[in-house]
Image (cartoon, rainbow, N blue to C red):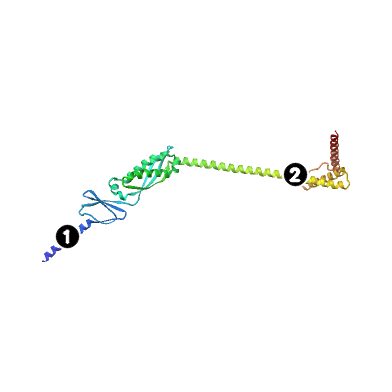
Amino acid sequence: MAGLLVNLAVVLTFFGLVILGVVLSTVFIVQQQTIAIIERFGKFHRTAGAGLHIRAPFGIDKIVSRMQLRIRQNNIEIETKTKDNVFVKLNLAVQFQVDPTKVVEAYYRLSEPFVQIRSYVEDAIRSSLPKYTLDESYEKKDDIAKDVFDTVSYEMSEYGYIIIKTLITSIEPAQEVKEAMNAINAAQRQRMAAQELANADKIKIVTAAEAEAEKDRLHGVGIANLRKAIVDGLSESFKELKDCGLSERDIMSILLTEQYLDALNTFAKSGNQVIFLPAGPSGAEDIRTQILSAFATNLKMDRVIDEE
């Protein structure tokens, strides 16, 4: 009896293990953002999305791949030349993902999607970049990236891949070319700096000349006003002395002597060590006599001219 029970227990354990194996080989789980590709007897059977699924056991249905639907990135480095025959290295980042509606094409038509995307990108870059010079390639970087995107996205869509974005992360010419570009840029900036300094000097010179001209103009106006004031003062003094009954000769003598003494006083206050000739006591009288004589001579000549 005991032996029969042992044999029964062994049989039940065996069947239990068989059932457990069947269950384990039948049930499977697919993670989020993943699609499982299932083949039956080596032929595509169906796809399974995220969640718990059941398949035929004992290898009848086989999960051959789990395709990721998340966005992936392929970093590519390409060396090519520009329109002005400068070789550069471009670093590109291609972001892509499997098209959920074309998972079968993505798995069965492409064996190495990274390599094939790289080939299409290289071909698109070598067709687009030679249209631009080195300087233009920096300015038109977004246009080049768009050309690559348009070409690669169209080609890869047939194979079940969606190109999300193509980014040109860097454009690197040879070291000698970069040094030459920096030298040209430095020379241009030095020339601009020299021009700015020259313009600043020019402005200073023009401003100084204008200030000097304005100074001379104002000085001339001042002298003219001073002379006018002197003439007006002399005219007024002459009129007042004439009203007092003095003759013109006496008035001229008085005014000239006064001017002479004022000049001596101003000269003495200036501190100049100069001998004024004639310096004797009769100097004023001599100068007065000479000026009056010249004035009388000029007056006679004017009268003779008027009579003629």
Picture layout, residue 24 above or below residue 269: below
Q: Nearer the viewer, residue 180 or 126?
A: 126
Q: In the rendered view, tell whether residue 175 sits above or below residue 22.
A: above
- Toward the bottom, the furthest residue is 1
**Which residue is at 16% across, 62% downward?**
12
Q: Which residue is mark 2?
A: 224
Q: Quadrant of the N terminus?
A: bottom left
Compared across the picture, whether 61 is left or right of 298 comes to left
Q: Assign a secondary structure to mark 1.
A: helix
x, y percent for residue 5: 13, 65
Classify mark 2: helix, strand or loop. helix
Q: Is residue 2 above or below residue 247?
A: below
What's the CA distance linking mark 2 and mark 1? 134 Å
Number of numbered discs present? 2
Quarter where residue 306 is shown: top right
Quadrant of res 10: bottom left
Q: Amino acid at mark 2?
A: Ala
Residue under circle 1? 15
Picture coordinates of residue 203, whole percent (x, y) = 61, 43
What is the quadrant of the C terminus in the image?
A: top right
Residue 146 visible, this orientation? yes
- Asked if residue 280 shows in the view, the reply is no
Q: At label 1, which amino acid type do we have?
A: Phe
Other-residue count near label 1 (Cα within 10 Å), few / some / many at <14 / 14–19 / ≥20:
few
Foreground residue among 5 and 242: 242
- What percent of the width, then of the height, locates residue 123? 36, 41
